[in-house]
Image (tube, rainbow, N blue to C red):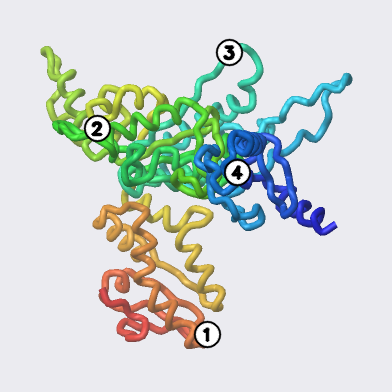
Amino acid sequence: MATDDIIKDDNNNEYEDICYMCRRPESVAGKMLKMTGNMCVCRDCMQKTFDMMSGGDNPLGDMGFGLFPGMGFPGMQIQDIPKSQRLRKKAKPETAGAAGGEEAAEAPVFDFRKLPPPHKIREKLDEYVIGQDRAKKIISVAVYNHYKRVTKDASGDIEIEKSNMLMIGPTGCGKTYLVQTLARILNVPLAITDATSLTEAGYIGDDVESVLSKLLKAADNDVERAESGIVFIDEIDKIAKKKNTTSRDVSGESVQQGLLKLLEGADVEVPVGASSKNAMVPMTTINTKNILFICGGAFPDLEEIVKQRLSKQSFIGFNADLKDKYDNDPDILDKVTNEDLREFGLIPEFIGRLPIIYSLKGLDEAMLVKIMREPKNAILKQYQKLLALDEVDLEFDEDALAAIAKKALEKKTGARGLRSIIEDFMLDIMYEIPKDDAIGRVYITADYIEGKGGPRIEMRGQARLAAPQTPQISVNE
């Protein structure tokens, strides 16, 4: 009875069994022999045990554990293995198949009926992302077509190829936030990784397969959900092929080569609950055929490459354009071609696996002000909610918002720098307000942002008070 209670562990209803010897999950190793103590052994390991015991007169202690597949640490029972290193079981079909005992076709993880059309995806993105209208339109259509392909690809004899994407835009223009919002709208797992941390297998750094380990973790170790998720690789321009070098490019061209099979679609063995392969963690296989890969980068020198190409084309004949025609073109990155990307340092095979290429615009002062104020989770609304919990109202005047936007432009951090700037000015305010229950409202002015005074304070039931030199809530720049 006690043994039955152990075997009927609550985790077993949700997670796969793992072989006690080789640490492979049941989806990889097959059916397990479950023994006393909640110890499971796969058929391969059991057969190898019998073979070694019957092959000679060596005692059991001299067994060649190195011959076991993926040998881990023998001695840790399944209940001691952390959930982060255990796979969730696949969901069984709800209904039986047609009459005659045939099994029902496996339902896709992503339900096409719940997939919003492109205009609905765009409307949702508009609630959170300011500007970037063309990019939002492109990504809405691309994602809609991708998940149509995932759910309908099994029908018919025409195979629809995967459409991975390349986003080009300056730092802080919203590339990462756009992808995060998209994944939240679609309710799919998302993994974000930095291309600068990736290296060729065998060198210090993360292998390219580590991005799939992050995706599996985001899917709560559910392989099926992970196989319909999104992977965003940021700073992709940092793995451009290095020019004029004779040393091995382990973090550039070699990483591009390593990513090819992931982008194309392949069965990849990845560690569960870890970023690198080793004998102490279980392994599983993920098929990347239906994983959407989105790469993003600033590509700082790409504008000049495009300008040079366009200038050469237009500087011919009697009706030639002026040489500086494209110098101030705000849409210059919309004219990027595969040849420009190859000149930048991306290899042709890598470019070919990113068929959808689009750019995001740099943010100006007006857009930064809108970003602070208009989205559903705008940063100003967040601080207003924080102070509302102390029963204090917070207001920013228009000139203060413009001053904050100018500081972000000066730092060249885009929207990413807005929070840190506002946090600097709000720190002392949020520290001092809980001390005085009489404070009812705080006004942030341009003078306060520019260091010419302090915020204006309104006490409860009193007229508004000016506090240009209030020591306890002034910010020293």
Query: Alpha-carbon distance for marks 3 and 2?
Result: 35 Å
Query: Alpha-carbon distance for marks 4 and 1?
Result: 44 Å
On the image, numbered disc 2 is attached to which residue?
Answer: 241
On the image, numbered disc 1 is attached to which residue?
Answer: 460
Residue contact between numbered discs 4 and 1, judged by CB atoms under 8 Å? no
Kindly identify the amino acid type of the residue bearing the numbered disc 2.
Answer: Lys
Which residue is painted at 17% across and 19% down in the image? 314
On the image, numbered disc 4 is attached to which residue?
Answer: 187
Query: Alpha-carbon distance for marks 1 and 3?
Result: 70 Å
Residue contact between numbered discs 1 and 3, judged by CB atoms under 8 Å? no
Q: 142 or 121: nearer the eye?
A: 142
Q: Few, some or many C-alpha atoms within 10 Å of disc 1 (few <14, some 14-19, many ≥20)?
A: few
Query: Alpha-carbon distance for marks 2 and 4?
Result: 35 Å
Q: Few, some or many C-alpha atoms within 10 Å of disc 2 (few <14, some 14-19, many ≥20)?
A: many
On the image, numbered disc 3 is attached to which residue?
Answer: 158
Kindly identify the amino acid type of the residue bearing the numbered disc 1.
Answer: Arg
Residue contact between numbered discs 4 and 3, judged by CB atoms under 8 Å? no
Percent x, y of residue 434: 49, 83
Query: Alpha-carbon distance for marks 4 and 3?
Result: 28 Å
**Extreme residue in the front direction:** 57
Instruction: For the N terminus, give its image quadrant.
Output: bottom right
Percent x, y of residue 473: 36, 81
Q: Nearer the viewer, mark 2 or mark 1?
A: 2
Q: Earlier in the sequence, mark 1 or mark 3?
A: 3
Percent x, y of residue 67: 52, 37
Residue contact between numbered discs 2 and 1, judged by CB atoms under 8 Å? no
Q: Earlier in the sequence, mark 3 or mark 2?
A: 3
Q: Few, some or many C-alpha atoms within 10 Å of disc 3 (few <14, some 14-19, many ≥20)?
A: few
